[in-house]
Amino acid sequence: MKALDLAIILAYLLGIVLFGTWFARKQKTTSDYFLGDRSIPWWAVAFSIVATETSTITFISVPGIAFSRGGNFQFLQLVFGYLLGRIVISLLFIPSYFRGELLTVYQLLDRRFGGKIKMLAASLFVVMRNIADGIRLLLTAIVLAAVYTSFQPAANAELITVASIVLIGIAMIVFTYYGGMEAVIWVEVVQLGIYVAGAIAAAVILIGAIDGGWATAVAAGNAYDKFSVFDFTLDFTKTFTFWSGLIGGCFLTMSTHGTDQYLVQRYLCTDRPRRAVAALLTSGAIVLAQFIGFLFIGVLLFAFYQPFVDPAYATAASTSFPFTGGDRVFPDFITRQLPTGLSGLVVAAIFAAAMSSSLNSIAATAVNDLYKPFRPQQDDKHYLKVSHWLTLFWGVIQIGVAFFVRHQNRSALDQALSIASLINGPVLGVFLVGTFFRRVSEPPALIGMLASIAVMLYITFGTKIAWTWYVFIGSGVTILVAWLVSFAFTPATAERRDQLSPNSVIEETTS
């Protein structure tokens, strides 16, 4: 990489910060800060969902999946579940989001059950999202460190990674602190174009750099079974099978896209249900195409580096030999092999994915669901000020998470999704209880969630069950325990029973 590449990267970071501060003039109320005054077009929300779901973890980790020894396209089985989950959300949850003036999805739980359930679900979201996005911040810092060491090979890579975490973290905090959710969404629209263009450019360069081009890459992929898509084995310890992908992926998406403030907040930035549905379903088609493209990049990297020609390949401790992990393969190619200017563009694309900040969603949840119940009589300006300070606080926490996990060799995609799956199961379960089990009141629902958390902690640390099943199991435990325990308690009141019940899609989504 050359000085031009570094200039492109730094200009992008500076541009993001300035863009966020420009939006600050519009942030007069908490509704402006968290929802963009509900005036954002559905297509921008769709692109924002894609940018959010793709992230740095996808950009870097998915190619590493196909590159690794034994890696293939079976990850797509999970994506098929993502598509099914979107359909369920459109029918089941989105109509409920537009009944009343919601700022967070967890306020629905308050209406249906009460404050304790809402606060527990909101707390789980805050914990999970900070961990997952701390991991994403680390990945981006690894790329920036690789950029710098390409200029200064003798530099201490560990020290540069730490400095990169701080630099990118500060840029993310400043951008979100001033710009709010509207700035986040519009920047994500731009980011989607940047990183798709960057990925396509990298793929074209890869094909040209491989001796024999596309044909050689396909031949290498076929020889090592890289294009295998389906595995119909019913094995709960295997991460990617048809059943874990379709069922587990569906429940994972129902939780992340249906009950997680990070993505639900984007639907609330539109003005009606049918536009939210259009955004969600459109994003699914784009995401499927993107995952296929990133997996193909992994096969191209496999054909370019040709790790299989080394006798040590079959027995190497790292399945991503000669790299220490799959997350380091694509960054190595970007920083060492791409031509000047293009390398800077692709690294900027990675930063683009990293800037899909969750800080605004975390602040929205912390203020509305965890702070307001204890300070209910304050004016809106007070809550807006607290929102800004919490954005700063949670940004520092994410930087701390990145420091903590930087020595882990496990795939960042695997870490982030397993964390999300562990915590989202109990939350999705209580939403489903509120939707389908009308007699269940707050105490049984709370007991069901706590039982689910306990079971999921055991499954995570005491069994070999794959994380793709976590949300399905976690939500199932919540539902079963809450329903059984409900017979020992007074049924929910009539006023609360209908708060989460699904109405006709035709009536709700065409309003």
Image (spheres, rainbow, N blue to C red):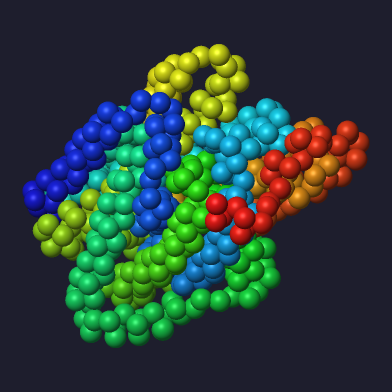
Residue at 66%, 37% in the rendered image = 109
Image location (x, y in percent) of residue 11:
15, 43
Q: Residue furthest left?
A: 3
Residue nearest the observer in this picture, 218 or 88: 88
Image location (x, y in percent) of residue 483:
83, 45
Q: Is residue 467 left or right of residue 76?
A: right
Q: Can residue 102 be seen from the camera position used here?
A: yes
Q: Is residue 417 left or right of residue 188?
A: right
Q: Up-down: is 491 above or below 189?
A: above
Q: Residue furthest right?
A: 488
Residue at 55%, 14% in the rendered image = 377
Residue at 39%, 32% in the rendered image = 32
Q: Up-down: is 173 above or below 339?
A: above
- Tell me how many marks there are: 0
Q: Residue 178 is drawn in which quadrant?
A: top left
Q: Up-down: is 354 above or below 293?
A: above
Residue at 51%, 76% in the rendered image = 229
Image location (x, y in percent) of residue 484:
87, 44
Residue nearest the observer in this picture, 58 or 461: 58
Q: Is residue 507 left or right of residue 160?
A: right
Q: Can residue 332 be seen from the camera position used here?
A: no
Residue nearest the observer in this picture, 506 or 8: 506
Residue nearest the observer in this picture, 161 or 175: 175
Quadrant containing the N terminus is: bottom left
Image location (x, y in percent) of residue 481:
81, 44
